[in-house]
Image: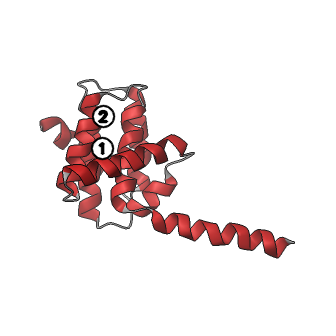
């Protein structure tokens, strides 16, 4: 009986994890960041699409598809580890760019919210980045 349960859970988990791409995971984190203040503004959504297009070299259609998948995943997510685990595999300079892009998304609506700050404060170490990296990313995003 235990072997049956073990096979059931272990066979499903790797397949689900393998299906997630860095693009989708990055977008899901950005959707969660945009939603953390309780408002998912059109300008934040547009910023996510822009980030996907430039950061992952996607065309408009593919970026919209990735965003739609990310919105569905973010809505069903119970934590951030599923997404950060995939993004953390990217090179450090790309993770720093993603952290800056996260700030760009949350600042896109022109308001800085404590919930957004708290989320990015939690995400940075999960992405293998320091508090200093987080502060520099925020500064870089603010200057844009």
- Residue 102's tag is 1
Cβ atoms at labels 1 and 2 below 8 Å apart: yes
Q: Is residue 129 above or below residue 48?
A: below
Alpha carbon of mark 1 to alpha carbon of mark 2: how far?
A: 6 Å
SS under mark 1:
helix
- Residue at point 33% right, 50% down? 65
Find disc 2 in the rendering and name its residue: 106
- Residue 70's tag is none
Specify the quadrant of the image occupied by residue 139: top left
As drawn, the residue found furthest toward the right would be: 1
Q: Is residue 68 left or right of residue 97?
A: right
Specify the quadrant of the image occupied by residue 31: top left
Q: Is residue 100 above or below residue 2?
A: above
- Residue at point 42% right, 63% down? 86
The percent coordinates of residue 125 (x first, y second) are: 41, 53
Q: Quadrant of the C terminus?
A: top left
The percent coordinates of residue 32 (x first, y second) are: 42, 40
Q: Is residue 108 left or right of residue 66?
A: left
The percent coordinates of residue 54 (x first, y second) are: 17, 53
Specify the quadrant of the image occupied by residue 55: bottom left
């Amino acid at each position: 009986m235990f072997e049956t349960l073990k096979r059931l859970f272990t066979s499903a988990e790797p397949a689900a994890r393998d299906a997630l791409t860095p693009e989708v995971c990055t977008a899901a984190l950005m959707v969660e960041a945009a939603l953390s203040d309780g408002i998912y503004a059109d300008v934040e959504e547009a910023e996510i699409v822009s980030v996907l297009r430039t950061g992952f070299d996607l065309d408009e259609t593919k970026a919209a598809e990735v965003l739609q998948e990310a919105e569905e995943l973010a809505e069903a997510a119970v934590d951030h580890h599923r997404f950060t685990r995939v993004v953390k595999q990217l090179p450090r300079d790309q993770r720093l760019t993603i952290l800056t892009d996260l700030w760009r998304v949350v600042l896109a609506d022109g308001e800085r919210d404590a919930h957004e700050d708290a989320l990015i404060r939690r995400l940075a170490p999960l992405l293998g980045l320091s508090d200093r990296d987080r502060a520099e990313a925020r500064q870089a995003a603010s200057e844009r």
